[in-house]
Image (cartoon, helix red, strand yellow):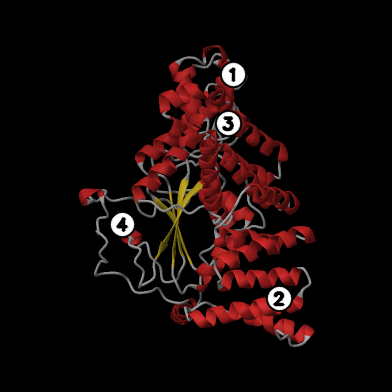
Amino acid sequence: MKRLILLISLCLLTTNFLQLSAQPVGINFCHDSWENLLQKARNEGKYVFVELYGNTCIHCRNMDTFVFTHPNVYILYNQHFVSTKINYSEDSQDFSYYELAHSYSVDLSGEVLPVLLYFDYEGNLIRKETGGKSITDMIYIGNKVITNPYENGIIAGMNEPPAASNGGSMYDGKQPSDRPTTPLTEREVQVKNTQNYVQAGGFQSTSDPAPEFFNTQSPPPLVIKTPEQPSTRQPQDKPRFNDRPDVRAGSSVVVVSSQMEADYKRLNELRQYFRYSDTTTNQNTIIEYAYLLKKLHQAFNQVVNYYLELEKANLYKEQNKNFIYDFAINLENKAIDYLVADIQYYKTRKGGEAVNSQVKNAINYTVLTAIREKDRKLFTKAEQVIYRSHLPNYETFLFEMRSLFYQGIEDWSAYSKMVSRYMEENTISDPVVLNDIALKFQRNVNDKKMLKKAIGWVQESIRIENEFYNNYTYALLLVRTNEPQKAYSAAQNAIYVAQMRRDGTDISAALQLVDRLSSEFGDYHDD
């Protein structure tokens, strides 16, 4: 019986590892209904990022490969956005766009793909970008949304949510008759813009210059100017909370909902009112302040710790228990410590699955912060929380977070040793996973012994499933280990498999490799 339980546990562990390893490090794109995506963003205090892409869009493929996988990009977006992708090709069978577009009275598409849409968690569209973007562009745009989301007001709010029959899609899998045609290519838009230039007498740039780096500090509050609030400048002798200014320099008039305007107004009042040295402040006022900071995407950790310290003797109260749960969404305040210390209580009251999910999200958020700041001490705290939280299959989650951290800080020595140890302890039979791990080693690991192990994994992948992708990876690894003749044969075999299948596989990279090997070392022929 014990052997059976052990075998089942190993199977579950391996299955989770396969799912993990098959996904590249990058922006986490979720696939769910629009309502559920907004609810997820609401629960996690994040914005929503939507990419409309196309099957033949070169910029989309480049961004998938080089931009969305860059650490500075995916750390920022995974921490602050719930992200999703929608295939907007004319022949696409992905009808998610129509479910999204039906909720808005403005056109969400664009003349050029990709189209990048940014929403707050209430579903308000607050920014729209089109065309290919660089790493610097994505960081700049993301930070503009985070630091000043309503700088240009709300582009569009949601309509009344449509009723879907039987709980399914409102289109029931049928393609609407008004599906838009494929957006214009970059070249076609350049021609169109040139015509506009001739007619108008010149261009006017609409984009701000992209900075060399991004600011990770929390922003000051956004102040909404209205006719009833002609001036937002405050007397200099008034006490300020954190000594931070209320007014952003050059803030512009924007149109927001009355509730949001009231929230920001109240937040500014509380900023002026509070002092950390004042221990007589009403606890309900502090709670209100903390929740407002969270709602409006402001830094709240210091206020949370301030409140928990004041209420240290009363943490058993229901109100404080709920406060702890609501703010245990990262590891950078004390709420997570109190939650983990009494985790069985929270699992009983909130449900084990909900608590486990929240703890994992908090750990993931903090690991991304540790990557951005290259803070090994913070990552060590994340490891400790994993051990203390009694998470199901915690070994797999620990492996996932270590893999993410070592790749993020580019410590390929630690990454390769960890993965190698795991591969030796577990039997992996998925050819795609074996290939993907080998390819990561080929790109990033320099240790010859580790590269030899990677060759063994990709050979096993080929044995299970003889495909272009793993033969080409095999050829690349053989180049790294200085075996050009074998590399030539592997590349030729990759080309042969693709040509035999005639499935449209792009073999240009393998052809270039064969050409390079031939020119550098002469023609190779199998005996």
Q: Amino acid at mark 3?
A: Asn
| 113 sits left or right of 369 in the view | left
Q: Earlier in the sequence, mark 4 or mark 1?
A: 4
Q: Amino acid at mark 4?
A: Glu
Q: Point out residue 250 in the picture as x, y percentages from the top left corner.
A: 54, 49
Q: Nearer the viewer, mark 2 or mark 3?
A: 2
Residue that carries the numbered disc 3 in the rendered image:
301
Q: Point out residue 122 in the picture as x, y percentages from the top left corner.
A: 38, 44
Mark 4 and mark 3: Cα distance apart in space: 37 Å
Q: Is there a contact, CB below 8 Å, between mark 1 and mark 2?
A: no
Tell me the residue at 51%/44% (across/down).
12
Element under label 2? helix
Q: Point out residue 296 in the picture as x, y percentages from the top left corner.
A: 47, 38
Mark 1 and mark 3: Cα distance apart in space: 12 Å
Residue that carries the numbered disc 2 in the rendered image:
487
Between 449 and 262, the residue placed more toward the observer is 449
Total marks placed: 4
| Residue 401: quadrant of the picture | top right
Tell me the residue at 56%/39% (across/down).
220
Element under label 4? helix
Mark 2 and mark 4: Cα distance apart in space: 48 Å
Q: Residues within 10 Å of mark 3 (few under 14, many from 20)?
A: some
Residue that carries the numbered disc 4 in the rendered image:
99
Mark 4 and mark 1: Cα distance apart in space: 46 Å
Q: Is there a contact, CB below 8 Å, between mark 2 and mark 4?
A: no
| 65 sits left or right of 256 in the view | right
